[in-house]
Amino acid sequence: MLDLEVIGQGATTTIYRDGNKAVKLYVNAPPNEAENEADRQLFAFYAGLPVPAVIGVRRLDEKNVALYMELISGKPLFQPKMGKDERNDAINTLVKLQCMVHKVQAIGQPKQIDKILWKIKQTPHISASQKNQLLLSLERLDTGSNNLCHGDIHPLNILYDGNKHWIIDWVDSTAGNPLADACRTYLIFKQFMTRQAGIYLRAFCKEVNVKSEDILVWLPIIAATRLSESMDDKSRVWLMDILAQSL
């Protein structure tokens, strides 16, 4: 689409290098998706978090919108052929960065609970009775917290430039409960990096002095929200099994 070097690829976006800028191109994205991500990233940036600066949003045509931001020349937190100790150190770094995010109060940002409710209600992959059980659980778990939650913290969304770690991809950030945010990270580890899931969970619990069950109680809710996202059949069946076992 753009005559630039591709440096990243997401489910609905492509990221290009343009000199010292990164250009995140949204194709057929939901209305205002680029603007929303820019606003959330700016909030995190001005909160003092290690986040690329936002330069601006440019609409290229009716279907294509680009978010221009500071280019981070870094590598993802996890690299091929890392040793056990290196992976453990990387997970501890991820946990410290995630907890740094959670310390920010995000009153006025989109509400985590609203996003969860919307995802559960709109997914066609779970039954009406399951949805009712999930909504009752969510009502019990909602504490009204307004901590900043990234919404998709995992090793590919943390870059290291040799001096500093950066947190990228802020489109899903909300104001909400850090334990739900941690459960999302745990589930991603469980799905894609199974051996590291327990290590992450223990590290997070130790860092914030909570019990693992305080996080895992969110598992059916977070699994249901994942089912609203685009994925292959194998992943969908796996999440539906988690949901069935949990409920």
Image (cartoon, rainbow, N blue to C red):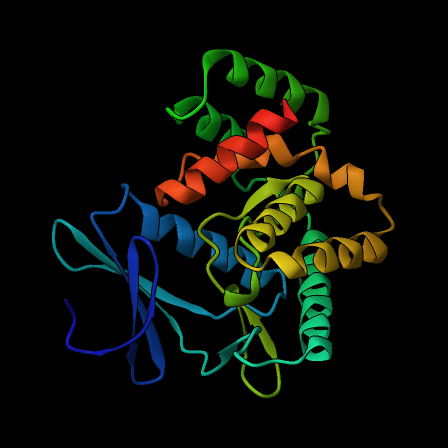
In the picture, the quarter occupied by the C terminus is top right
**Is residue 226 rendered to the left or right of residue 67?**
right
**Is residue 212 rendered to the left or right of residue 34?**
right
**In x, y percent, where is residue 242?**
58, 34
**Is residue 204 rendered to the left or right of residue 174?**
right
Point 48% across, 55% down: residue:
170
**In x, y percent, where is residue 175?**
60, 41
The answer, for residue 189, to whether it is visible in the render is yes
Q: In the rendered image of this protein, does residue 48 appear above or below residue 74?
A: above
Tally of numbered discs: 0
**In x, y percent, where is residue 63?**
15, 50
Q: Residue furthest bottom?
A: 162
In the picture, the quarter occupied by the N terminus is bottom left
Point 56% across, 81% down: residue:
81
Q: Residue furthest right?
A: 209
Point 59% across, 55% down: residue:
189
Q: Quadrant of residue 235?
A: top left
Q: Nearer the viewer, residue 61 or 122?
A: 122
Q: Nearer the viewer, residue 247 or 145?
A: 247
Point 37% across, 24% down: residue:
124
Q: Nearer the viewer, residue 22 or 157?
A: 157
**In x, y percent, where is residue 17?**
30, 79
Q: In the rendered image of this protein, does residue 131 appear above or below residue 30?
A: above
